[in-house]
Image (cartoon, helix red, strand yellow):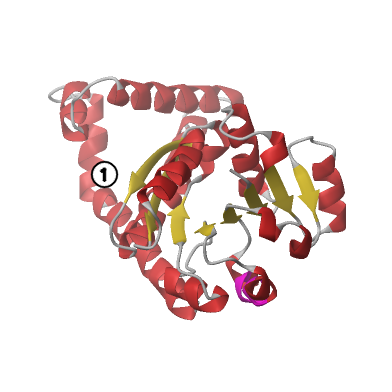
Amino acid sequence: MKILIIGGGNMGMTYAQSFLRSHIARKEDLMILERSEEKAGMLAKKDIGTIYGSPDTCLENADIIIFAVKPQDSLALFATLRPMVDPQQVFMSIMAGVKIETIQEALGIKKVIRAMPNLPAQIGMGMTAFTSTDDVTRIELVMVQNLINTTGKSLYVSNESFIDAATAISGSGPAYVYYFMNAMILAAKKMGFSESEAELLVRTTFRGAADLYNKNNFSCEEWIAMVSSKGGTTEAAVASFKKNLVHEDIIEGAEAALARAVKLGEKS
């Protein structure tokens, strides 16, 4: 299986390194297309596959093509690739907001998979939602899912609209976590802790809470109840959150992200 990754940025390199680390692909079968000569030169030193600067020297050899470029660069890229594509090739896109129909029409192909990974994919703890057209065979879909799973967990969704929803939840989600962590760090500093002490307290608390959640079957509401004592400190904090509608604000923020994702899709 020959894999071509178009785009040598963070996600492109995350995929390349994950594929090689998991031994799902060999260096000899991995190609990376990077138009920047400077970046291509840097990638060549990493020994992660064959680096190309032009699609006419590599596209025809690929079984699976992964688009890891900026959405705003997609239409120009598609126009360049269209004369070279083979209808039997499988195309996977991780470009936010670029719809499957847009890719199909721009390239004149039918086998398209659209995926939305997130930042923790860089350390093998990512979450990726993906969907596909009916023309992608079951074997091809399993092959691509195996590739995706080298970066963490995956969820197949039957309707493309759920990709936008996943963008708002898991795609943007790490930023929500960091936003809350930052507020807690600022609160700790306000209480007198140093920067390093505040970061240690918050970082370790988040890691421990997430691991505890993952290793048990209790819901978030049940964990909150277990931490809270009648008339205690946690109860006071949760009461303040409820009074200030923090819960509702988080939901509203996620819905704003979804609305933006839908808008981006309309523009594409």
Residue shown at 59% from the left, 28% from the top:
23
Rendered image quadrant of residue 207? top left
| Magenta span | 74-79
What's under tag 1, amino acid-wise? Phe
Answer with left or right where residue 228 lies relative to residue 246. Answer: left
Residue shown at 41% from the left, 28% from the top:
206
Residue shown at 41% from the left, 49% from the top:
141
Residue shown at 25% from the left, 55% from the top:
248
Can residue 182 be seen from the camera position used here? Answer: no
Packing grade of label 1 (10 A; few <14, some 14-19, many >=20) is few
Can residue 48 be seen from the camera position used here? Answer: yes
Answer with left or right where residue 94 lies relative to residue 44. Answer: left
Was residue 78 drawn as part of the magenta stretch in this picture? yes
Answer with left or right where residue 23 lies relative to residue 58. Answer: left
Q: Is residue 99 above or below residue 198?
A: below
Q: Is residue 66 above or below residue 18?
A: below
- Pick whichever, 225 or 111, lies toward us: 111
Where does residue 257 sit, x and y in percent of width and height? 40, 62
| Dominant secondary structure of the residues highlighted in magenta in the image | helix
Was residue 121 drawn as part of the magenta stretch in this picture? no
- Pick whichever, 243 or 33, lies toward us: 33
Q: Is residue 153 above or below residue 79?
A: above
Q: Secondary structure at mark 1?
A: helix
Q: Which residue is mark 1?
A: 241
Answer with left or right where residue 122 lies relative to residue 262. Answer: right
Where does residue 61 sit, x and y in percent of width and height? 68, 54
